[in-house]
Amino acid sequence: MEQESNEILIDSYRSGAIDKIAKDNTTIFTNFEDFVNEAIGTYIMFWTDPAQAQMNFNSLLPHMKPEQLKFMKKMMDKADTTGKEYENFTKGMNEAKSKLQPQSYFALTNPGQQRYHLDDIRFRAIEEIIQTENVSKKLKNVKAFVDYAITLFMTWWTEPEEAIPLQYAIWPYMPTKVKEEWKNNSKFEKTFIQFDTDAKEWNEKQGIVLPKLEDSTNLENIDNEIQEKTQSQEFSVPNEIQTMKTVTTEGAKNLYKICKNIKETRELIKNFPVPEHRTGDALPYDDFPLIWEFYSRIMPIKLLVTVLADMMVKKGTPLVSYSDFREEGYYAALGLSDSLSDYEKKYGIKRNEKKLFC
């Protein structure tokens, strides 16, 4: 697998916007690189060390524009109508602001797209974040993480209200442990609970269902249980000597989850109403046969229908995201493919030998 580059390309539009943001703020950023460094560093801490991230954010408060502070107060007062959380969170801000000194600004010598070099320490830190739980479903690689960090930071310094949906969108992929640390931060306990509620509502509108915060402590135990059971799966045939095969792929995990819940899914899916007429959300049918008369591989279709039913039951809705369905289907198919391949190898079944699966 090719190693991802440490060189991150920042397009002309964003580099120009960053240059302007940094120039307009006369007390903190001295150049383009200052802004990018702060964006990436703050975002890494947001994903790994909430306490440090909060301290870092506090240090930025004196440099923020009135509209940023006004919006932040609006959000925090929604959660705490007494205004105490905002007051405690911003304590000392005005005094620190009075001591700020203007900084000299050094504009880009060559405007246009910029190549930003990410040092190895932050590069590895981001790689570790991406490998945690399901972060990679949203942020596929280091570049995606850096892009998101820069976009979020730019938005916060120009259009604060537009930065919140960006936070909501990333929330389902935030590691459980980190969410718990944010939840237990006494500085903005009520604000966090309100944010978590709003994030859940926002994501549900997008077709993404978040686990309840109070249930989050059980997620690690559930994952561990699944991991233990998928580490060693038995594949056996009656009257044959049992053999063991270790299965550790993501595909095996997904297949295991689906198979484990299949009886319950079969029962619950019966409660979903079947419309008499096709809805406007349905894909149009062109009258071409769904299955070619010489194509008899029904098993992949049965697998995908099972995946779809499992997703519908989990989300409690007959409508699911196509991209999510495609990903879930892929991993389930991968797990099944590995299982069948192991079965064929164990019992000497040739690839062209036909078998009937019901």
Image (spheres, rainbow, N blue to C red):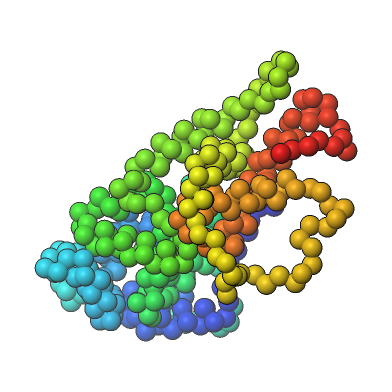
**Residue 91, percent from left and from top:** 15, 66
Which quarter of the picture shows residue 282? bottom right
**Residue 197, percent from left and from top:** 31, 61
Q: Residue at x 34, y 42 (%)?
A: 217
Q: Is 125 rendered above or below residue 355?
A: below
In the picture, which quadrant includes the C terminus? top right
Q: Is residue 100 visible?
A: no
Between 288 and 27, the one lying in front of the other is 288
Q: Which residue is drawn at 85% across and 55% down?
A: 293
Q: Is 22 rendered above or below residue 302?
A: below
**Residue 245, percent from left and from top:** 66, 26
Between 90 and 227, the one lying in front of the other is 227
Q: Is 250 rendered above or below residue 187?
A: above
Q: Which residue is drawn at 68% across and 23% down?
A: 236
Q: Residue at x 11, y 68 (%)?
A: 82
Name the residue at the front extreme: 276
